[in-house]
């Protein structure tokens, strides 16, 4: 039964095989129930195999050798990943010492005297789509009128520079392009991009201007650890319980319980939130705003709504759905009710602040990440690259906003606004590219909307 236990404890590998779409060519679509079926088949097979092995000493030796090879392979893979990360750290250190020629002039000059040291808020609602995608889920677009009433300019048909977070955040916080059409992204490049966020140009420029960097960690996808001065987060009360849950996540048992919860909605909070005891939703984020230190501050607020895990009905009560499209629509309806509350709270507390609300990417309900990037249609690319984007700027800065503005230019506009000068904007470019472990394997395709 040792092999059965190994299969169980390596549940991440099995889930990744099924849920990544790797078996789509055999018509196995990404569904959690398929992972559970595979678990049952493999464990049953291992149980029978264990009975045979127990009677054959030779087979026992072969099984032990196989386990040893598996462990050695994992060890080599781990060592390689450490080497890649360390090499990326050295590369990032070298890059950060030489400012690229396309960086705005202000970032290469000495300390700038701004007309006012306004606080700057950057709010990232993960996976929040733009207005053109709202009708797909029957979500009312009243939020756009709400944010305009709060003094925001809503960008017309804005897009992200890439369709997944790992390629979008480096554009936002690096203010530069790093992809080319037809390129194949390597492991080293991915590692450099990831490490580069902890040495990013946006944080460095704010610090040079005398700003304090404050990150509000929502407890789902932490963006703390990039060199911020203050990370605001909810502390975990029982670390031992969290460790137990993380262990159980590697087994079929949590997935089975989660599947039951999606059908029956019997747990509150839902099973898929048990691994996030330090989570903060928008009301929690609003409650910590009064505790922020006096400025000037750059406040980075990342919150998972409307991104997975799916957890809310349209009235923002806990609810699970086994229909992903329905779950996304319901959670989007919750998001459009909650986001204006956060914006009002910031305006009431800090009426002169610059505020940008901008998602990192759109959604992929056509299964874009399972296809070659060359096969993606216009509709598929728009869905995956369309983002929510709105700016509240001083009057003299609003003229610099334009339709189709992409996130690589976000902080080029913010810093120019603080300086009272013309921004040095880059051409708006969009790239279809997904993670290396996904079927498209990091292939890059530049997209020009028609």
Image (spheres, rainbow, N blue to C red):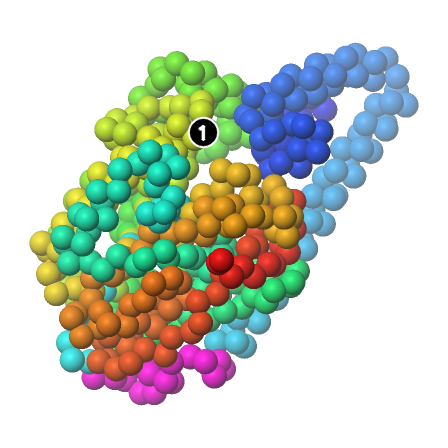
At x 86%, y 28%, the residue is: 62
When asked about the image quadrant of residue 323, the answer is top left
Image spot of residue 369 (x, y percent) = 57, 44
At x 42%, y 79%, the residue is: 103
Is residue 359 among what the camera can see?
no
Q: Could you say which is closer to the camera, residue 441 or residue 89?
A: 441
Query: Is residue 445 left or right of 334 when viewed as pictured?
Result: right
At x 16%, y 64%, the residue is: 353
When asked about the image quadrant of residue 60, the answer is top right
Query: Is residue 193 left or right of 263 when viewed as pictured?
Result: right
Q: In the rendered structure, does residue 107 fall within the stretch colored magenta? A: yes
Q: Is residue 29 above or below residue 122?
A: above
Quarter of the rendering occupied by the N terminus? top right
At x 12%, y 60%, the residue is: 350
Q: Is residue 313 above or below residue 49?
A: below
Q: Could you say which is closer to the camera, residue 406 or residue 359?
A: 406
Q: Could you say which is closer to the camera, residue 363 or residue 376?
A: 376
The residue sitting at the front extreme is 450
Q: Could you say which is closer to the camera, residue 207 or residue 121?
A: 121
Q: Is residue 450 above or below residue 33?
A: below
Q: Over which residues does the magenta segment extend?
A: 97-113
Query: Is residue 407 left or right of 30 when viewed as pictured?
Result: left
Question: What residue is disc 1 on?
Answer: 324
Identify the secondary structure beneath mark 1: helix
Image spot of residue 219 (x, y percent) = 35, 43
Image spot of residue 58 (x, y percent) = 90, 23
Q: In the rendered structure, does residue 133 fall within the stretch colored magenta? A: no
Query: Is residue 271 left or right of 17 when viewed as pictured?
Result: left
When asked about the image quadrant of residue 138, the answer is top left
Q: Is residue 59 above or below residue 332?
A: above
Q: Looking at the magenta stretch, what is its main secondary structure?
A: loop
The residue sitting at the bottom extreme is 110
């Amino acid at each position: 039964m040792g092999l059965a236990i190994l299969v169980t404890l390596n549940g991440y590998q099995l889930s990744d095989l099924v849920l990544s779409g790797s078996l789509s060519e055999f018509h196995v679509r990404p569904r959690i129930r398929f992972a559970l079926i595979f678990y049952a088949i493999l464990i049953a097979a291992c149980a029978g195999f264990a009975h045979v092995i127990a009677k054959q000493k030779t087979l026992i030796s072969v099984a032990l050798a196989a386990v040893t090879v598996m462990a050695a392979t994992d060890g080599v893979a781990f060592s390689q990943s450490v080497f890649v990360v360390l090499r990326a750290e050295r590369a990032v250190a070298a890059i950060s010492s030489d400012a690229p020629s396309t960086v705005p002039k202000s970032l290469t000059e000495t300390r700038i005297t701004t007309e006012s040291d306004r606080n700057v808020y950057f709010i990232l609602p993960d996976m929040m789509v733009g207005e053109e995608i709202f009708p797909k889920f029957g979500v009312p677009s009243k939020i756009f009128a709400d944010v305009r009433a709060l003094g925001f300019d809503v960008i017309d048909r804005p897009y992200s520079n890439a369709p997944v977070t790992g390629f979008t955040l480096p554009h936002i916080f690096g203010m530069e392009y790093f992809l080319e059409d037809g390129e194949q992204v390597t492991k080293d490049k991915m590692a450099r991009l990831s490490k580069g966020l902890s040495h990013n140009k946006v944080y460095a420029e704010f610090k040079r201007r005398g700003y304090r960097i404050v990150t509000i960690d929502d407890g789902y996808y932490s963006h703390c650890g990039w060199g911020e001065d203050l990370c605001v987060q909810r502390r975990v009360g029982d670390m031992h319980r969290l460790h137990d849950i993380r262990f159980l996540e590697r087994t079929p048992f949590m997935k089975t319980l989660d599947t039951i919860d999606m059908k029956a909605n019997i747990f509150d909070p839902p099973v898929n939130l048990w691994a996030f005891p330090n989570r903060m939703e928008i009301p929690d984020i609003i409650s910590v705003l009064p505790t922020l230190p006096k400025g000037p501050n750059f406040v980075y607020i990342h919150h998972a709504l409307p991104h997975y895990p799916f957890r809310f009905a349209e009235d923002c009560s806990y609810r699970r759905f086994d229909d992903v499209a329905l779950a996304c629509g319901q959670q989007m309806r919750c998001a459009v009710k909650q986001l204006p509350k956060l914006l009002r709270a910031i305006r009431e507390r800090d009426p002169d602040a610059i505020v940008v609300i901008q998602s990192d990417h759109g959604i992929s309900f056509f299964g874009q990440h399972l296809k070659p990037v060359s096969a993606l249609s216009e509709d598929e690319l728009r869905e995956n690259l369309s983002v929510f984007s709105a700016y509240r700027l001083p009057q003299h800065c609003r003229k610099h906003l334009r339709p189709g503005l992409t996130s690589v230019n976000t902080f080029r506009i913010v810093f120019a606004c603080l300086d009272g000068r013309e921004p040095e904007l880059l051409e708006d470019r969009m790239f279809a590219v997904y993670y290396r472990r996904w079927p498209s394997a990091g292939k890059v395709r530049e997209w020009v909307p028609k």
